[in-house]
């Protein structure tokens, strides 16, 4: 940190009965009121350097007694005024990044320019500002931080713009540079010097959002800073200034209070950060985008910000994690724990983008689609526990993923099982609708064993699971295992007890004459398969099987063995 000292006299200002004055053998002849503080000073040293005071005194020459000149709107208050007064008296003052803005505004107010006297305060401050303040990282940052009480003054004097331009030029000269900053600490009369190394993104994170936005916008327009560095800086700034969302959720306060200053500031910060996001894909992580989306939802930022984030998340959805997708719902129109609608919107945008990219590498698109399908099934398992999630939205999420994108249906089955347990009041038709996308051939052996004994599943699904399990067992060369006792009992009650085929191993067997019909080339696929009709679960719990009309001389076989042969 740079500093400059002016003047050589000792400080002789003192206070008496609420009045500030200076020790002198000459009587005071100038009374100045700054806010609530009164000063008894001398005309000669102040008027020789302050054009404003000269004009005030020249306008009041008809008064014989000293008049009180009130400077109620003085920038920087009594500290800034006293610094200027001490300069006029030649008393030593110290200038640094912490007080140069207030001193510069005060000198401007008092018109302490070169027109009044050579080497006046304005000139000295400008020299120090240009040669020292603008050359240092920390000095520029601190100077910008002190401009808040003097925003109009700082803009008019060019202090803010020159500091931002200096920071931008430093970054553009070497975006990868790590800045070293030395600072001194005094402890028990021992002075120690420490050197801290920081990246420019960490320095800029100390700025308030309006200054940070202007700086980052200038960096982006320069086109020399890589998008990933812009994204890294945005992430540092957001993590430092955005309140902890988890705390807001825990106490449930301040989420929807638009008059809350902290919520209002958070909305402004979020909307500003979103406008600074680089347009390049992967400039920021999908996890970071989803955290911003979660914050936008909680602090109820603008709808345009929400849509922009949803669009960006959709472009990188294959990188997301389930935990990042659990965005709390704060809408008064929904009782669900998480915002299911926003995820549906993201999925739709992802599918539209995938369709528009059909000319790209098919392997890359398929890889992304497979990842998203697993992501959706994981998300379904999380929201399935919420009793307020409507069936229509749950099914919409299931069917948003193309059928071919789900290589396995184990996770989908788990999600459906959780939803059935959390929603025991679903009727038969609703349970069928929920399970219609489930492909039993894509279930693992472990899941098949669970599904075969799952009383919550429609009976049709259970039978399909059993058929699929037996088919795989036959293809693997193993004997057909027995059916669960509850299914045996159900089928036996209707006289359809299964009898396994004579031989289900892969060893060669002599075909029976009655099997030759299976090889007929004239028999269509649709007529050679057993059809489980939609009303396979009548009120009495029996299983209806619709069989095709085949050759009349064909011996009657049980339902299960005939289906085996057709497989």
Image: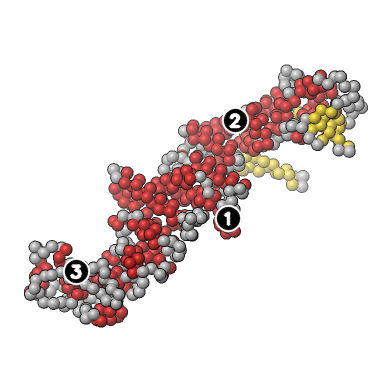
Q: Secondary structure at mark 1?
A: helix
Give the quadrant of the N terminus.
Answer: top right
| Viewer-nearest of discs 2 and 3 | 3
For marks 3 and 1 on the same chain, the one whose residue lies earlier in the sequence? 1
Q: Position of residue 323 (x, y in %)?
A: 46, 57
The Cα atoms of the two marked residues, 1 and 2, are separated by 36 Å
Q: Residues within 10 Å of mark 2 (few under 14, many from 20)?
A: some
Q: Secondary structure at mark 2?
A: helix
Quadrant housing residue 282: top left
For marks 1 and 2 on the same chain, the one whose residue lies earlier in the sequence? 2
The Cα atoms of the two marked residues, 2 and 3, are separated by 79 Å
Q: Secondary structure at mark 3?
A: loop
Q: Is residue 282 above or below residue 464?
A: above
- Residue at x-position 59% and y-position 45%: 265
Q: Position of residue 95 (x, y in %)?
A: 72, 32
* Residue farthest to the top, as pictured: 115
The disc placed on residue 248 is 1
* Left or right, residue 219 beside residue 436: right
Check disc 3 and report the residue beneath it: 530
- Residue at x-position 25% and y-position 78%: 491
Q: Nearer the viewer, residue 346 or 107?
A: 346
- Residue at x-position 30% and y-position 75%: 539
Q: Nearer the viewer, residue 31 or 332?
A: 332
Give the quadrant of the C terminus.
Answer: bottom left
Q: Residues within 10 Å of mark 3 (few under 14, many from 20)?
A: some
The Cα atoms of the two marked residues, 3 and 1, are separated by 57 Å
The disc placed on residue 161 is 2
Quadrant housing residue 546: bottom left
For marks 2 and 3 on the same chain, the one whose residue lies earlier in the sequence? 2
């Amino acid at each position: 940190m740079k500093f400059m000292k002016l003047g050589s006299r000792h400080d002789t200002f003192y206070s008496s009965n609420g009045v500030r004055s200076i020790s002198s053998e000459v009587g005071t002849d100038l009374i100045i009121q700054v806010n609530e503080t009164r000063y008894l000073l001398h005309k000669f040293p102040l008027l020789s350097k302050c054009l404003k005071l000269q004009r005030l005194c020249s306008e009041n020459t008809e008064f014989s007694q000293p008049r009180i000149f009130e400077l109620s709107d003085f920038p920087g208050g009594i500290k800034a005024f006293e610094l200027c007064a001490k300069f006029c008296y030649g008393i030593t003052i110290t200038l640094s990044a912490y007080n140069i803005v207030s001193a510069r505004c005060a000198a401007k107010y008092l018109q302490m320019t070169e027109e009044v006297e050579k080497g006046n305060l304005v000139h000295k401050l400008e020299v120090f500002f240009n040669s020292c303040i603008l050359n240092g990282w920390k000095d520029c940052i601190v100077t910008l931080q002190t401009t808040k009480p003097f925003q109009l003054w700082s803009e008019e004097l060019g202090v803010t713009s020159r500091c931002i331009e200096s920071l931008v030029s430093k970054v553009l000269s070497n975006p990868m540079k790590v800045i070293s900053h030395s600072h001194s600490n005094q402890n028990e009369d021992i002075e120690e010097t420490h050197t801290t190394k920081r990246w420019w993104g960490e320095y800029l994170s100390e700025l308030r959002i309006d200054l940070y936005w202007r700086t980052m916008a200038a960096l982006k327009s320069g086109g020399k800073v890589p998008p990933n560095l812009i994204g890294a800086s945005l992430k540092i700034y957001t993590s430092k200034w955005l309140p902890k969302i988890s705390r807001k959720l825990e106490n449930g306060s301040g989420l929807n209070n638009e008059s809350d200053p902290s919520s209002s500031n958070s909305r402004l910060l979020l909307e500003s950060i979103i406008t600074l996001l680089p347009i390049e894909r992967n400039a920021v992580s999908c996890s970071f985008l989803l955290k911003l989306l979660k914050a936008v939802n909680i602090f109820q930022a603008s709808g345009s910000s929400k849509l922009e984030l949803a669009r960006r998340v959709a472009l990188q959805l294959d990188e997301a994690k389930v935990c990042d997708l659990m965005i709390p719902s704060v809408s008064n129109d929904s009782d669900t724990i998480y915002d299911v609608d926003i995820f549906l919107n993201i999925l739709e945008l992802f599918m539209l983008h995938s369709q528009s990219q059909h000319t790209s590498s098919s392997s890359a698109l398929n890889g992304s689609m497979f990842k998203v399908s697993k992501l959706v099934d994981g998300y379904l398992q999380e929201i399935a526990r919420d009793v307020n999630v409507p069936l229509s939205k749950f099914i919409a999420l299931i069917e948003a993923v193309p059928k071919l994108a789900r290589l396995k249906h184990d996770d989908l089955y788990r999600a459906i099982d959780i939803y059935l347990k959390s929603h025991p009041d679903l009727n038969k038709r609703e349970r069928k609708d929920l399970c219609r996308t489930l492909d039993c051939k894509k279930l693992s052996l472990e899941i098949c064993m669970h599904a075969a004994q799952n009383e919550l599943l429609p009976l049709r699904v259970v039978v399909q699971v059993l058929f699929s399990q037996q088919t795989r067992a036959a293809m693997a060369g193993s004997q057909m295992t027995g059916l669960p006792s509850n299914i045996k009992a159900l089928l036996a009650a209707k006289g359809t007890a299964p009898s396994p085929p004579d031989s289900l191993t892969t060893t060669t067997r002599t075909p029976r004459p009655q099997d030759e019909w299976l090889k007929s080339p004239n028999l269509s696929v649709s007529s050679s398969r057993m059809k489980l009709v939609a009303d396979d679960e009548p009120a009495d719990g029996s299983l209806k099987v619709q069989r095709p009309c085949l050759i009349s001389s064909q011996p009657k076989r049980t339902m299960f063995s005939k289906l085996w042969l057709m497989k």
